[in-house]
Image: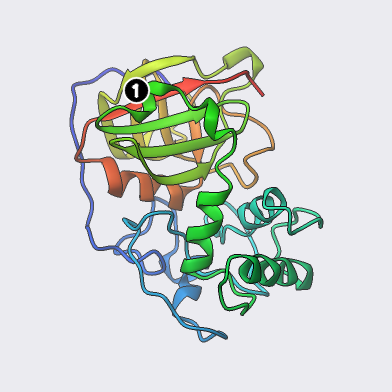
């Protein structure tokens, strides 16, 4: 948990950002080396240009790509987890897009009536993310009220973003450890800082931080490569690209955060 005292401010960043070509990288990120740059690479199938404001958006992911580190996340682990939940993939979650993953993407694309290129393009992600929101029926009613809601299920390692009761996106995250559990409850974001550094943990970077309960915040993590491995000190850790995506969607709007579910 990160302690922070301060007045409410809202820091904004550029809009119209392409998922594969950010106008400015997250703190410590190297834009030229970003795994998202693959969106402009040649690949079988159509290239979909999209902004990070699109519903259920991720960058294009294809065979040969991998999650190489916290500042080079290509969302391959997420793809493999979600293909598992869609029941088209039985292989290991390795963070590397190999032949087994490609076959699973093709299987899913055929099932969804998409052209089976074997590339997880924008259309594929839009279907897959929507289809793999877990325990949808257990999302609290408050999350479906008017306004913007980020709802974190501690047991599923899942944040779902809703606007006026309509699903906008979902991300895989991790929360606090057993002795520092992210607190259950509903709060409104009261402070934002695009380039926050923790005053409690030796200046640890917390990019795109949105504080909602004491020192607890939604923010990009400089340590997380697999959301189902290890925990935070109480905050909701996101991949840096995902935290930037949430920031772009909500940083100028009141955002209500609800934390629920059994600790995992």
Q: Please say whether residue 1 is visible from this viewpoint.
A: no
Residue at 68% in and 74% down: 64
Q: Residue drawn 43% across and 32% down?
A: 203
In which quadrant is the C terminus drawn? top right
How packed is label 1: few (under 14 Cα within 10 Å), some, or many (20 or more)?
A: many
Identify which residue is drawn at 63% across, 59% down: 76
Secondary structure under the numbered disc 1 in the rendered image: strand
Q: How many marks?
A: 1
Q: Which residue is mark 1?
A: 212
Measured along the vertical axis of the image, is residue 21 above or below residue 155?
Answer: below
Q: Quadrant of residue 40?
A: bottom left
Q: In this figure, which colouring scheme has been used for the structure?
A: rainbow
Q: Nearer the viewer, residue 68 or 256?
A: 256
Q: Is residue 213 left or right of residue 148?
A: right
Identify which residue, 204 or 161, lies in the foreground: 161
**Residue at the image position 43 percent from the left and 54 percent from the top:** 56
Percent across and percent down for residue 148 are 29, 34
The spot of residue 128 in percent (x, y) is 56, 56
């Amino acid at each position: 948990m990160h302690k922070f005292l301060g007045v409410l401010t809202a820091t904004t960043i550029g809009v119209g950002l392409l998922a594969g070509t950010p106008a400015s990288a997250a703190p410590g990120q190297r834009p030229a080396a970003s795994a998202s740059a693959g969106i402009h690479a040649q690949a079988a199938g159509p290239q979909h240009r999209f902004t990070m404001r699109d519903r259920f958006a991720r960058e294009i992911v294809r065979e040969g790509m991998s999650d190489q580190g916290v500042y080079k996340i290509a969302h391959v682990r997420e793809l493999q987890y979600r293909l598992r939940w869609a029941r088209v993939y039985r292989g290991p979650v390795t963070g590397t897009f190999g032949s087994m993953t490609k076959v699973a993407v093709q299987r899913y694309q055929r099932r969804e009536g998409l052209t089976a290129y074997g590339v997880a393009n924008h259309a594929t992600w839009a279907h897959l993310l929507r289809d793999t929101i877990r325990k949808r029926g257990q999302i609290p009613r408050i999350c479906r009220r008017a306004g913007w809601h980020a709802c974190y299920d501690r047991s599923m390692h899942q944040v779902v973003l809703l606007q006026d009761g309509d699903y906008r996106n979902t991300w895989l995250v991790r929360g606090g450890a057993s002795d520092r559990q992210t607190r259950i409850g509903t709060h409104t974001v009261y402070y934002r800082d695009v380039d926050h550094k923790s005053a409690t943990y030796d200046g640890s970077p917390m990019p795109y931080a949105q504080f909602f309960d004491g020192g607890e915040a939604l923010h990009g993590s400089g340590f997380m490569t697999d959301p189902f491995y290890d925990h935070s000190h109480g905050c909701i850790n996101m991949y840096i690209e995902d935290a930037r995506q949430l920031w772009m969607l909500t940083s100028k709007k009141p955002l209500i955060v609800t934390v629920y579910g059994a600790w995992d």
